Amino acid sequence: DTGVSQNPRHKITKRGQNVTFRCDPISEHNRLYWYRQTLGQGPEFLTYFQNEAQLEKSRLLSDRFSAERPKGSFSTLEIQRTEQGDSAMYLCASSLGEQEAFFGQGTRLTVV
Amino acid sequence: KQEVTQIPAALSVPEGENLVLNCSFTDSAIYNLQWFRQDPGKGLTSLLLIQSSQREQTSGRLNASLDKSSGRSTLYIAASQPGDSATYLCAVRGNTGNQFYFGTGTSLTVIP
């Protein structure tokens, strides 16, 4: 499968715990995006990488959120000290430059 | 900031009908516009990408148009089928090319 892969698909965690999600983009894509989607809403931009450089971060990305793309390939999104308001679907996408973006299946986070 | 609106929020049609989904955006300085499909609890599947210089794109029973000056795009679905039931999202990429701005989607139900 050469699509965008996200792991895990589902994560249930207790409030205050740290969680980390992984995204493997399409191999030749230099751009990688993280979005967050809550029920009934469209996805909201979190952050974007071009190769290994994190070039833009949304104000939604509080200090508890950190993203990395260490070798310009896969990316991780970590949330520290999770809160109930962090419960959402976290979506990763990749593209070659400004061309068509492809999304993964998402990671559904539930904070209890 | 780019604002994207999709109307209607929900649509229910009998199988076989042709239908039109609407997307409007406030800033006409866009790089491209992409239509996605999202099934419940799943990620986004790319349907069509229209570059800012294009007026129309077609894929099978789907046809997307773009009128950049008026800030509008439509997605036309011909001969709808129950398998078309999903939420349809439009996403606008701004001229900086860095992120997408999504609408809240149109939830489509095709009744057999």
Image: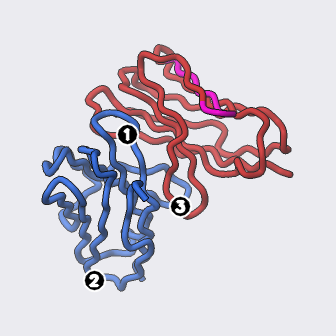
Chain colours: A blue, B red
Tell me where residue B41 sits by quadrant. Answer: bottom right
Image mark 3: chain: B
- Dot 2: what SS? loop
Disc 2 vs disc 1: which is toward the camera? 1
Q: Where does label 3 land, which residue?
A: B42
- Between the C-alphas of marks 1 and 3, the distance is 19 Å
Q: Position of residue A56 (x, y in %)?
A: 20, 45
A66 or B79, nearer to the observer: B79
Going 23% across and 64% down the picture, which residue do you hit?
A65
The number of numbered discs placed on residues in the rendered structure image is 3
- Between the C-alphas of marks 2 and 1, the distance is 30 Å
In the rendering, which numbered label is found on residue B80? none
Q: Residues within 10 Å of mark 2 (few under 14, many from 20)?
A: few
Left of A90 or right of it: where is B56? right
Q: Amino acid at mark 3?
A: Lys
A35 or A32, nearer to the observer: A32
- Dot 3: what SS? loop
Q: Where does label 2 land, which residue?
A: A17
Going 30% across and 67% down the picture, which residue do you hit?
A22
- Dot 1: what SS? strand
| Tags 2 and 1 both on a single chain | no
- The verdict on residue A80 being magenta is no
Left of A22 or right of it: where is B39? right
The N terminus of chain A: image quadrant: bottom left
| Tags 1 and 3 both on a single chain | yes
Q: Are marks 3 and 2 in contact (CB under 8 Å)?
A: no
Main SS of the magenta segment?
strand
Q: Where does label 1 land, which residue?
A: B100
Q: In this picture, which residue range is highlighted in magenta?
A: B59-67
Q: Are marks 2 and 1 in contact (CB under 8 Å)?
A: no
Tell me where residue B27 sits by quadrant. Answer: top left
Q: Are marks 1 and 3 in contact (CB under 8 Å)?
A: no
